[in-house]
Image (tube, helix red, strand yellow):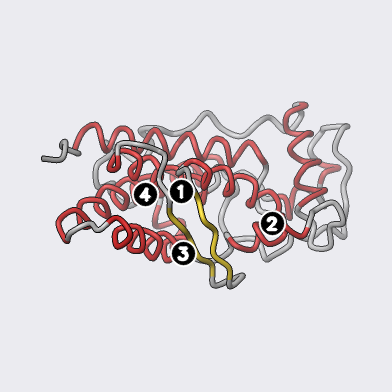
Amino acid sequence: MLGLRLSRIRPLALESPWQFRPRGPTPLTSQEYAADFEEVKRLGRFDSTARTDEQTTDALFWTDHDLRQWNEGMLRLAADRGLDFVQTARMLAMAHVSGGDAMIACFDAKYHYMFWRPAVAIPLADTDANPATEPDATWRPLRATPNFPEYPSAHACHSSAVVEALGAFFGTGEVHFSLASDATGTTRKYNHLHDVVKDVEQARVSVGFHFRHSDLEGSILGRNVARFVLGRFSRPRD
């Protein structure tokens, strides 16, 4: 299983996969968990009437393979900026070493905490000892849930690390670029790198895959990994 093996891969730059391991999921009996539970229960259900058409499109946009999305997006960005081969290689190296180690760290955390997905948590809410969560045996996410643990969000870990690396490469977060999705056949244009992370955090709730806390923690993990990688190995451009 790729996810389980990924957590055991030697990082490219980190000292260990658990170097930036996050603090863990919110306790099942907490008010924060109950709030996250209600949000994904309401928005992430396959036939949700609370989710807008725009939120549905955004949710499905990020069900495409994010490595392909990012690679194509970065190559378009390099062409738009007129980067030469060396500059393009540098940009991709910064992004992929940061993103790759963020994924290793993310899956280390996933298999350390082994937290349940909404697809399991919602039907079995009568077992979580939280009186504020109500079970729904008919609940299903908008798309089939990935077959590895929930916490933290891998998409958030990866996207935030790549965004941090791109910001370091260009020296600013104000970068105009686009990402495309084969899942929706649409292209999204961005004027600021961190807007991508915000989109991912919302999309993974709206598709029914993650609790909000897991998205936010994944974004923090990705940023921490990227800053370490870039601070240790990235030299200033000539």
Mark 4 burial class by Cα count in 10 Å: few <14, some 14-19, many 20+ = many
Residue 159 tag number: 1
Q: Quadrant of residue 77?
A: bottom left
Query: In this view of the protein, which residue sits in the foreground, 88 or 119?
Result: 88
Q: Which of the two discs, 2 and 3, sits closer to the camera?
A: 2
Marks 3 and 4: in contact by CB < 8 Å?
A: no
Q: CA distance from mark 1 to mark 2?
A: 17 Å
Instruction: Tell me what residue is drawn at x 63 percent, y 51 percent.
Output: 204
Q: Mark 4 = which residue? A: 99
Residue where numbered disc 3 is placed = 1
* Residue named by callout 2: 207
Among numbered discs 1 and 4, the one appearing first in the sequence = 4
**What's under tag 1, amino acid-wise?**
Ser
SS at mark 2 in the image: loop
Q: Horizontal and vertical percent for residue 229?
A: 27, 38
* Position of residue 57 measured from the top left corner of the image (x, y, whole percent): 68, 62
Q: Which residue type does callout 2 highlight?
A: Val
